[in-house]
Amino acid sequence: MKGQPGVMAAWARGAAAVRALLLDVSGVLYDSSGEEGPGSAIPGSVAAVRRIKQSGLKLRFCTNETQATRAKFVQKLQHLGFDVNEQEVIAPAPAACQILRERGLRPYLLVHDALLPEFDSVDKSNPNCVVIGDAADNFSYKNLNRAFQFLMGLETPILLSLGKGRYYKETDGLKLDVGVYMRALEYACEIDAEVVGKPSKAFFLSALADMGVEPHEALMIGDDIVNDVGGAQQCGIGALLVRTGKFRPCDEEHPDVKADGCVANLAEAVDILLKQRQQ
Amino acid sequence: MKGQPGVMAAWARGAAAVRALLLDVSGVLYDSSGEEGPGSAIPGSVAAVRRIKQSGLKLRFCTNETQATRAKFVQKLQHLGFDVNEQEVIAPAPAACQILRERGLRPYLLVHDALLPEFDSVDKSNPNCVVIGDAADNFSYKNLNRAFQFLMGLETPILLSLGKGRYYKETDGLKLDVGVYMRALEYACEIDAEVVGKPSKAFFLSALADMGVEPHEALMIGDDIVNDVGGAQQCGIGALLVRTGKFRPCDEEHPDVKADGCVANLAEAVDILLKQRQQ
């Protein structure tokens, strides 16, 4: 499962200009096993993160994870051996909280129980919008119907969706992601949701601003051809697709998005990148 | 809530040519109260059905109901006082069974428990397609995820959806309909579902064939501007919108579909229709 040398060369030639990396987490650093366990690190990825940090490259972990608070999520990654801290993680829930405050929005939440603490400081009385995240088992008919009724009762229905992913991979198989339920509510209410998280431009740009780099100085690495690769490219950020996580061979032939390069895994990407920098 | 005389006149002028009526059921004949109770007949609708039958007009009940077998559904209507029998009801599940047999499809079913007996005679071993109906509480995350995984495992994913409605109204509020979950699976799997039931042309045409009438001789009456009115009109069948059931005032200003007439309820439609026939 090595990348084709010809394909790699294209992005690798520009690798010397890269000053900052954006890494997707699930499917790039580790494979999730769901709520029950910590999942497992993808071989070579713990060392790859360490090598990135030692190289002096700037680094942010850019995740659409909404099944845990950022603090718990970081703890899980540290438990798996990753050198990561909370300030390095860009996640949708904190970004959504900022939007809610800026716009005076009070959310009705349909999210995973474990995410609720992220919204502790947000006014949720007399809601005037709905926020959905990857609620997993909380996506019951009853709960989705309540969110629907809520939106239908608003004069101007506002739906914030923490990501728009179709599915992700856990160790026991593919799982429906928040985007599927976003589409469901969009259709039910005849509205367009506002996406907070990848692939929204604002989300990628906030990560760049946090590092103080320009789009052409950054490289995104992810396993989601649309949300990681397509999203980054829309901002002028180069993007690599890894053949781990939920990657499927047809992703390399996607009708709308073509990655700047495909690599076997994060370790291979970092190998090539650091070699180019040394030349 | 009387219809505007000017608007009524347009369709009423052609009423003398009408030989057959197609009636939507939920929201036209009765308001559903969900699984627990029988619901309640909409005032005047029991008498209206009786008057249609006495008039000699042909009649079919054209429903997207998939929370019960046709037999149980008819029992419920009879219990509410309606003169209706099973042969007069056109419903998606029997239509789907016919399609499954014709095309050699073996379904994985995500439907309401009460609908399962309709599929008793269908081969469900080693499934090669997914059929979804208005599964209500069976639309759990676990069940929807199983249907998703199933579709993703098929070389040619085939999804039959028993209707594509957005929502319906029960006595305790609006409820998400099967179309919402159809859209969810379409997005998750990047496929287009095949709709069995309203608004599919085949469904309306089968009702006309059953009565032996041409489209211009029939009139559809429903509370769903898209699935009842728009669906019938696509087949050349005139269609009235009733202001009962899930009707909302904005339905009269729908961007794509304009009813041939709007009436307060079924009783008013039948009043006008029968008066025109007598002239």
Image (cartoon, coloured by chain):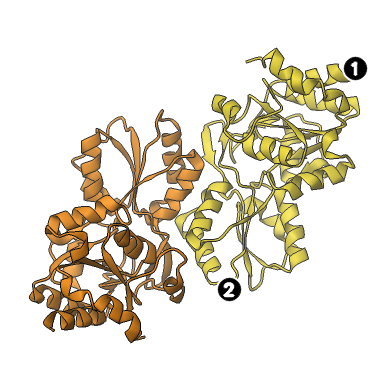
Chain colours: A orange, B yellow
Front-lying residue, B67 or A149: A149
Whole-percent x and y of residue A26?
29, 67
Q: Residue at x 77, y 59 (%)?
A: B98
Residue A272 drawn above or below residue A223:
below
Name which residue type carries label 1.
Answer: Gln
Residue A179 horizontal side relative to residue B166, left or right = left
Residue B205 horizontal side relative to residue A172, left or right = right
Front-lying residue, A104 or A11: A11
Tell which subunit mark 2 falls on: B
Q: Residue at x 42, y 36 (%)?
A: A151
Q: Which mark is residue B155?
A: 2
Crowding at dot 1, Cα within 10 Å, few <14 / some 14-19 / many 20+, comes out as: few
Whole-percent x and y of residue A163?
34, 54
Tell which subunit mark 1 falls on: B
Q: Secondary structure at mark 1?
A: helix
Residue behind mark 1 = B278
* Residue A202 appears in the picture as rendered: yes
Where residue B123 sits, quadrant-wise, is bottom right
Q: Residue at x 27, y 32 (%)?
A: A125
Compute the Cα span from label 1 to label 2. Answer: 59 Å
Mark 1 and mark 2 lie on one chain; the one further toward the N terminus is 2
